[in-house]
Image: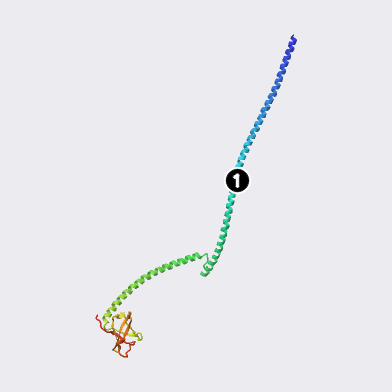
Amino acid sequence: MKAIFYVVALLVISGGIYLTLEHSRKFEALQQDRLTTIKTNKDVSANADVKEKELKDERAVLVISEQKREELKQSIDALKSSGATSERDIAELDGTLKAQQLEFAELDKTMKEVGEILKGLGEDITLDNLPDKIQQIEDDKKARTAKLDELTTLGGAAEKLLENNRAELDRLMKRNIERNSRIGRNSMEAVITAVNQDWGFLVIGAGSNSGFTPQTSLIVQRDGRRIGRVRPSSIEPTQTIAEIDFTSLATGVRLQAGDRVMLAKPTSN
């Protein structure tokens, strides 16, 4: 009986050991699987982190690439605009260049004309010293103008003084003539200098300075004998034009140069 018990106990113990060993083996297998899974998960997680980091880096690179692409596009647009502007500028420069070429041609023509003019002004005048020559001419002109103004002023003063002197001289001469006329009017006598028988007038060598007036009645004498009358028609300071009174002439008498005239009627002083 004890032997069966021992056998059963041994079987039970053996079974327990077997189960324990089997369970331990399975546990180790599960533990190994768990560790393998954990390691795999860690590896996967690590790979996922790497991929995530790589993805982030690629996204960052993509963003930078997009920015660069946009910047490049803007640069290309700017270059296109700049190119269009440059083409317009080039066209304008071409037009300006052509205009300048025409201006240079005109300037060259003008320079040649100026050269010919300078040759006419003198051998020592060139484009280099032309401003100095012009300034010299301007200075000389100013000096001459100032001198002319001075002379004009002096001339004006001299003319005014001369006018005043002439006026004073005329006044004195008039007063002297009037005085002499009053003194010598009654004894006044003049000579006929020319006679025009056809037109009936003669010229007497005395005039207003001697006291003749249009109202003066004159008689003509020859050798102290009265031969006719004349009437003054135009009186100047030193001569008188008179008309011949043919009715007063004696028969056959003709007035001639050298005959003398005198007052027909004495006047009182």
Q: Position of residue 150 (x, y in %)?
A: 39, 68
> Which of the 4 image quarters holds residue 166?
bottom left
State the scheme by which the image is colored.
rainbow
Furthest residue to the bottom?
252
Q: Is residue 10 left or right of residue 253?
A: right
Quadrant placement of the C terminus:
bottom left
Tag count in the figure? 1
Q: Position of residue 30 (x, y in %)?
A: 69, 24
Q: Which residue is mark 1?
A: 73
Q: Amino acid at mark 1?
A: Lys
**Which residue is found at the position 71% from the left and 20% from the top?**
22
> Which of the 4 image quarters holds residue 149?
bottom left
> Which of the 4 image quarters holds residue 112?
bottom right
For label 1, the crowd category at 10 Å Cα-Cα, with few meaning under 14, some 14 to 19 and many 20 or more, is few
Give the SS element for disc 1: helix
- For the residue pair 234 and 5, the one nearer the viewer reads as 234
**Which residue is found at the position 73% from the left and 14% from the top?**
11
| Residue 35 higher or lower than 196, as above or below | above
**Which residue is found at the position 54% from the left and 67% from the top?**
113
